[in-house]
Image (cartoon, coloured by chain):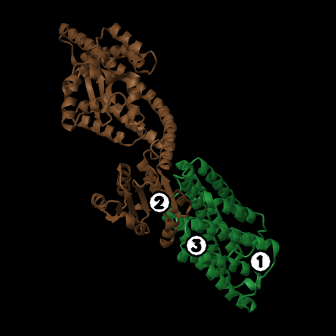
Amino acid sequence: MKILVAGLNHNTADIEIREKVAFNKDKLREGLTLVKNLPYIDEVVILSTCNRVELYAGVRDTEKASESIKNFLTEFHNIDRSLLDKSIYLYNDVNAVRHIFRVASSLDSMVIGEPQILGQLKEAYEFALENKTTGILLNKLMKKAISVAKRVRTETRIAENAVSISFAAVELAKKIFTDLSGKVFMLLGAGEMAELAAKHLMNNGVKEVIVANRRYERACELAKEFNGRPVSLENFLREIVHSDIIICSTGAPNYILLKEQMQKVMKERKQRQVFIIDISVPRNIDPKINDLDNVFLYNIDDLQGIVDANMFERKKEADKAEKIVEEEIIPYFHWLSSLESFPTIIALRKRAEKIKNDEIEKLLNRFPDIDEKKRKAIEYMASSIVNKLIHPPTTALKKDSEDRDLMVAIIKKLYGINDEESR
Amino acid sequence: MESYLFEFALIFYFLATLVGIVELFRSRKITSLIMFFLVGVGFTFHSANIIYRYIAAGYIPITNFHESTSFFSWSIILIFFLLQLRYRMKILSSFVMPVVLVLMISSSMLSREIRPLSPVLQSYWLIIHTVIAFLGNAAFALAFGVGTMYLVQEHYVKSKNIGGLFARLPSLQTLDELNYRLITIGFPLLTLAILTGSLWAETAWGSFWRWDPREVWSLVTWFIYAIILHARLIAGWRGKRAAILSIAGFLTIIIAFFGIKLLHKGLHVFL
């Protein structure tokens, strides 16, 4: 039995194609059963996320199975075949195993090291398990992939640093303040990135939110969204005294907060630390403010710099992770190839048993008056001849050697075991 | 036997300091555990050494310079372990162990002879005064370590060049508050040490205060820490300034501790 991966991801397919090929929960159940019943396919797991749709299958013939999976996808999702052919990738053997290990370890992700994929893979596997579409091959492979991913997680720092601007902001906030939950957060102005950062901060425990906006109605709207308190922009200076984290993103063409003003603010708040993030372009906060003690000012470029540095760090860690993946492929293949000779051993044993039983029966038919004791002796002798004869080939097949494939082929040919028998 | 206990403690502290330095540059879970373990083993030997000397001499072994330097380092590690119960800040030992090691090496070079206690010292004030004084100094030593950590972390955040230790050091607020807390522990102890010292001086020499160099320096230290606390409460001097002051305060303690021994001989001659 062989492993086959068929799939498409963010690198090979646009969102328009990916969303067409994606499986939702209901479709997934149906899809799993349909694929499992396709010819040449014995086991299947389907992983469907926003960035990838992949089918992992245990197959008898890679070529034919690939073809039937492609046909299935075309029909099931009702998409253009040429479109699918353009975006689909197929891996088998070592490449398939490597691909699955890399996906699990988040090395194939859009953002390398993002942690969700492992959970998604586990879920996909458990769902397949529930629907009984996996077998010995994929069970082992999925468990191995999960353990490889865990090893990568513990032995490298691939997922350690923030690689988006808003996460970098939260990471910094956590290195300035002990506990974000008691902190007051001010959103100055609005904008997609500012709001995203605000959401991340709130997910990390920030409760009290002040929203300041040039247009008071807009401030009220945003305040409702973040469960905060609206203030007008004219009053924000008074409010800054209470704010520990400030995200600024107004459209003002000049500085709206100067060093001297901030100095006064700091005096009033008894020098308690303030983290200011100025993501507006042009900048709204006087950069000199960063010179004040206990004030930490970051602008969009500073945050981007951190993200870039972290990304670079992740790529370095990814190299280590790739090595771990390569290391783990080898033992898996040892196991897999031992699986290959296993059916042949069983077939050989069955064949020998059958010959023995047939011959004993023939003998007993010819001499019906043989007593129980003699019959036992004859059976014993026959068993030991058979066992002694098949012992050496069995040992040879079990042994983990390079020419095992050859050995399997020779034994099959010598004893006339056909493929159907040795499955 | 007694001397071996001290040497073992010294060796383990030395190894812990080395691992602590490695930990700063190449952190692994294992290095931080090894460091913690080494400090723990060293501390066990060290405690055994102090108990041994106590039994052998019949009084608390803080009566000569060898013993007091040794007890000083022991107090630092004691407070380090107490802090771990609440803060789990193992990396602090990378910053504190070098101080301990310097003290221990100095201690190892001094005479360890146990002599009969001079009559002046034969008083229950000995144990009260010295233990309080060294626990207070130990709290300041840890405030020094935490202050250093604050400056390092502040440098990362201010310079916007995060890397190195950034991820492993605690947040600035945590460090700042811990620094403050250590000083609020050390300061009352220092005050008490000065008070008990002067009461003792009164019973021993008949005068509360004689401007002995150690008394003067204690007073200087007391003022430094009083200023730190005052500035924090009134003017909000926290963060970087508080960290720098706590480092300066501890350096004063160390200079006074060794300086007086080298230059003067006063009433605290036994120290």
Label 2 lies in what chain?
Answer: A
Residue at 47% over, 60% down: A275
Is residue A243 toward the left or the right of residue A216 in the image? Answer: right
Quadrant where the N terminus of chain B sits is: bottom right
B212 versus B100 height, above or below: below
- Of labels 1 and 3, earlier in sequence is 3
How packed mark 2 is, by other alpha carbons closer than 10 Å (few <14, some 14-19, many 20 or more), is many
Q: Is residue B269 visible?
A: yes
- Residue sitting at 75 percent across and 87 percent down? B210
What chain is colored green? Answer: B
Is label 2 in a helix, a strand or a loop? strand
Please tell me whether mark 2 or mark 1 is closer to you in this view.
Answer: 2
**Rendering coords of residue A229 (x, y %):** 32, 65
**Residue type highlighted by circle 1:** Phe
Q: Marks 2/1: CA distance?
A: 52 Å
Q: Determine the image quadrant of residue B59.
A: bottom right
Residue with the mark numbered 2:
A275
Q: Which residue is mark 1?
A: B270
Residue at the spot of label 3: B183
Chain given the colour brown: A
| Residue under disc 1 on the same chain as residue under disc 3 | yes
Q: Nearer the viewer, residue A146 or A140?
A: A146
Where is B217 relative to A180, above or below? below
For marks 1 and 3, give the CA distance: 27 Å
Among the 4 quarters of the image, the one containing residue A17: top left
Looking at the image, which residue is at 40% across and 18% down?
A397
**Dot 1: what SS?**
loop
Residue A217 in picture, x, y percent from top left: 28, 60
Q: Mark 1, residues whose alpha carbon is within 10 Å: few (<14), some, or many (≥20)? A: some
Q: Are marks 3 and 2 on the same chain?
A: no
